[in-house]
Image (tube, rainbow, N blue to C red):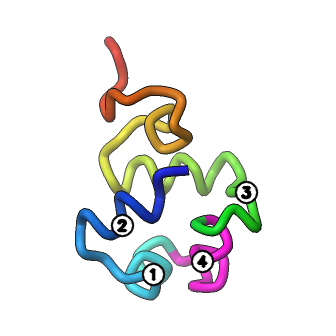
Amino acid sequence: MRLKELRKLNKITQIKLAVDLNLNQNSISRYESGEREADYATLIALADYFDVSVDYLLERTDNPKMNK
């Protein structure tokens, strides 16, 4: 998952991201390390937060926006 890359690119800490999305910082850390997988609702929230597609977040495409 590109979460860590997107977070660092946007200069956002794990704590800020967790607070903004009403998540636990520990969960963000585990998503980034691959220790835990985000559920559908969290994937959508993360994609919306960074204004990218879920496919981009999950590294299924290199295009950050959905093809329309």
Amino acid at dot 4 = Ser
Magenta span dominant secondary structure: helix
Distance of label 1 from label 2 (alpha carbons): 8 Å
Mark 4 vs 1: CB contact within 8 A: yes
Q: Residues within 10 Å of mark 1 (few under 14, many from 20)?
A: many
Distance of label 3 from label 2 (alpha carbons): 17 Å
Q: Which mark is residue 14?
A: 1
Q: Which mark is residue 29?
A: 4
Question: Which quadrant of the view contains residue 30?
Answer: bottom right
Amino acid at dot 1 = Gln
Mark 1 vs 2: CB contact within 8 A: yes
Segment tinted magenta in the rendering: 22-31
Mark 3 vs 2: CB contact within 8 A: no
Sequence order check, earlier mark of 3 and 2? 2
Mark 3 secondary-structure assignment: loop
Looking at the image, residue 58 sits to the left or right of residue 38; the answer is left
- Residue for point 53% across, 77% down: 22
Q: Which residue is mark 3?
A: 37
Q: Position of residue 68 (x, y in %)?
A: 32, 12
Q: Residues within 10 Å of mark 3 (few under 14, many from 20)?
A: some
Looking at the image, residue 56 sits to the left or right of residue 32; the answer is left
Distance of label 3 from label 4 (alpha carbons): 11 Å
Sequence order check, earlier mark of 3 and 4? 4
Query: Up-down: is 38 above or below 31?
Result: above
* Viewer-closest of 12 and 68: 12
Q: Which mark is residue 7?
A: 2
Sequence order check, earlier mark of 1 and 2? 2
